[in-house]
Amino acid sequence: MNLADIFRHWGRWQPRALAIRFGDRDLTWQDLDQRTDALAAMLAERGIGSGDRIGILLGNCPEYIETSIAAWKLGAVVVPLNVRYAPPEAAYVIDNAGCSLVLTDAALAPTLAEVEGRLPILDVGEVRAMADGQGSVPALDLDPSHPATICYTSGTTGDPKGAVLTHGSWNAASQGWVQAIQLTVEDRVLLPFPLAFTGGFAVFLFTLWSGARLVLEPAFEADRTLDLFEQERITALLAVPQIHEVLVQHPRWQQVDLSSWRIACSGGASVPESLIRAIQARGVPMLQGYSLTEASAAATILPGHDALTKVGSAGLPIVHGGSAVIREDGSWCEPGEVGEILISGPQVMAGYWNNPEASAKALQNGWLHTGDLGILDADGYLKVVDRAKDMLISGGLNVYPAEIERLLTGLDGVIELSVIGVPHERWGETPMVIVNTGGKALTAEQVLAACRGKLADYKMPRYLLLRDDPLPRGMSGKVLKRELREEYATLPERIIRLDTNMDKDKEPKHA
């Protein structure tokens, strides 16, 4: 099994059909197969082979996809790099994965400052020239357990962990999603958010696995997206809730022609019922899915025929998959009882890269322990109650409080602190730093200075709350964040707003 065989298949089956449209650039399936053959041959000449890791630090562009396919043709492993990484974050992931080279462009090259000179760095222009050339590589059959990507996601400790997603797991996830939402070669799927994140990478792979056309955008812009529904006759949009929300609130929402749109699906954060109903009022079934990086972005999805009868549900497992909810003692929950969500199936990761301890904790007895809370109803449909204990999601992107807490612990004026997510009108959630100063002085600038250059912009805290009494703690000594979230569900008047410049944008940045 090799994911690259999917692209070879469509290159023979429908060679002149469009595979990718990116602005005024079109790639047919034949183009895609030939260009990735040439690129694979050139990478092989540079010493890239089976098992080597290739880091990709790029915004959305065809070269991102071409490099991924070329890597698989060689048996190499793709390591997507978050385009918002600060240099220390990028260096950690590149070193931890043991990348043999990294692909980037001039705009993002400064992010690689800490690894420059230690490994080859290819510019996207070089990759384009390689793909424009001639060359081919023989088909390479791989075991389904062979790694295809290492996708990094932080745990509640804040330490990045690389989820090893294999050719078998991505193939199973693709099959599951394509069957669940019934993608066909006639579909045109819009992708306006980053390939660098697992959800974006999954949309590219699921779309092309089905033989559908991928309409790739460099970034999300509401006006442009609504134009594309009319101009490109978009049939499917799989995106985080914030993108759907911006579209629904747009002045053109009621007038734009959405007659081609048949699949709306959201995940990555809880989807408000009001948003679901607003989209369904335009005649588009709004589906909600549940997954995580460790399950190749595919776990459950709400069937289209239940879009109205099961509003708010994350649905049923994809084909060959399973879901369960358990109590703290490991016993199965009754229908309607809240417990930890477990996921099973061939789409689940092989484990965390070079992290056997974390792998053993996450993968037990054939089940992926998600740490998320949910309910299974009497029909076996999943409803997500809460996410992983400490994580928050801002603009559809994961933010781990421990990363921020580590940077701020030890600052003058900090006795103890905690970071929680609080509601935000644009981003859904945003980090708030709560500090027990014991009456000592602590300024907003001190907090921001400790984070600048060390955190991606969407992780930067936007609120600071100073208090002079201890934070609530349990018997184990851990801060009880649930109590803090309840206490500050409504922001107090004494809140300090931190100027990170993020809220000056008209719309969420997804690239």
Image (tube, grey):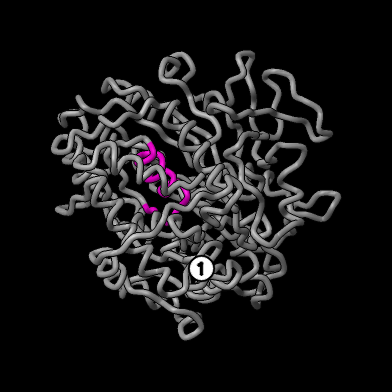
Side of 366 where 255 appears, left or right: left
Q: Position of residue 200 (x, y in %)?
A: 40, 48
Can I make out residue 266 in this image?
yes
Q: Looking at this view, is 484 or 32 the one in front? A: 32
Q: Looking at this view, is 174 or 363 the one in front? A: 174
Residue ID at (35%, 40%):
9
> Which quadrant holds residue 29?
top left
Q: Is residue 208 magenta?
A: yes
Which span is picked out in magenta? 194-209
Position above or below: 382 against 362: above
Residue ID at (60%, 37%):
346
Residue ID at (68%, 62%):
354
How many tags in the picture?
Answer: 1
Can I make out residue 445 in this image?
no
Side of 474 where 388 appears, left or right: left
> Which quadrant holds residue 250?
top left
- Dominant SS of magenta comes to helix
Q: Looking at this view, is 206 or 420 the one in front? A: 206
